[in-house]
Amino acid sequence: MASQGDMVERLRPLVEVHRSRRQSPVRFRPATWRPWLEPHGAAHVLGLGAMDATSTSGDRVVSRDDLATARQALGDDPEGLRDLFVAVMIWGAGITNGRGPRYTSAALGDARLAHVLEATRSAVRVGELTRAYSEFTLRGVQRSFFTKWFATVDDRDAECERALILDDRVFHSLNALGWSSKKAAGTRRWPARYTAYVGAMHEWAGSLGVTAAWLEWLMFDLNGHVEAP
C-alpha cells in the first residue's frame, strides 16, 4: 500500500492539473421524482435549486451550496431533517441514477427513518464518524448515498476532519493510486475504514493546499483515470 507521503506525491500532479476546476451543479427531473415523493408528502422538496434554463423537460439544477443553505435553514426541525435527506438523495442521483427515486421512497417508508437521521446527524456533528456509519441502516440507502448525508449534515468548523462522501468512483481512483482503506484501517470493518479514509483525505488535502471536499470530488470525477495529462 502507498504510504501517506507516496500518496501526496501521486496526487500532486493531478491536483496541479485540475486545481482550477470546480464541481458543477447536478441536474434532476422533478417529473421523474414526483410520483415517488408525493405519497410521503415530500414533493415540495422538488423546488430545490433553480430551473435549468437549457432544459425543455422542466429540469432543475441543485448544487452542494444549495444543500449547505438548506442545512443552515433547518435548525432542529425533524420534518426539515427528512426534507434535507430527500434533497441529498436527489442531488446524489441526478438524472443518471434511475433507481434513486425508488430507493428514496423505500427509505421514506422505513419506520426507522426519523431515528436514523437524527442519531447519525448527532454522531457526525461531534466527529463520531465510525458510530454514524455503524448506525445508518435504512432500506434502499447504501454507502455512496448515506455518506453524502454525513457530508451534508456536518456543520463543524473547516479545521475539523469533516465527513466526506465515499462513492465507488472515489474508491476507483484511490485504489488506482495504490491506497487501500482496509490496510489503512487495519481491519475489514467498514465503519473503521470510512473513518480512516476521511482522516487520510484531510491529511493529503492539507499537504496539497486544497480542501478535502474538493479532493474527494476530484477523485469522484476522475473515476479511476488517475494518469496525469
Image (spheres, grey):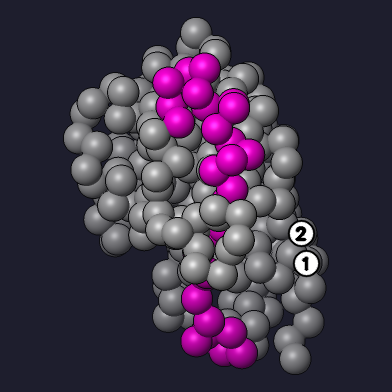
The reply, left or right, for residue 165 in relation to residue 124 is: right
Q: Is residue 73 above or below residue 14?
A: above
| Mark 1 residue element | loop
Label pair 2/1, CB-CB below 8 angstroms: yes
Task: Write the residue at 30% across / 46% down.
Answer: 70
Image quarter where the N terminus lies is: bottom right
Name the foreground residue: 32 vs 86.
32
- The residue under label 2 is 172
Task: Write the residue at 75% across / 76% down.
Answer: 226
- The residue under label 1 is 224
Q: Position of residue 16 (x, y in %)?
A: 57, 89
- Name which residue type carries label 2: His
Q: Is residue 69 above or below residue 17?
A: above
Task: Write the residue at 34% across / 29% down.
Answer: 81
Residue interval drawn in magenta: 16-43
Q: Is residue 212 above or below residue 49?
A: below
The answer to whether residue 12 shows anywhere in this view is no
Residue 150: which quarter of the image?
Answer: top left
Q: Position of residue 115 (x, y in %)?
A: 40, 15
Q: Mark 2: give few (<14), some (14-19) or many (20+) Cα within 10 Å.
A: some
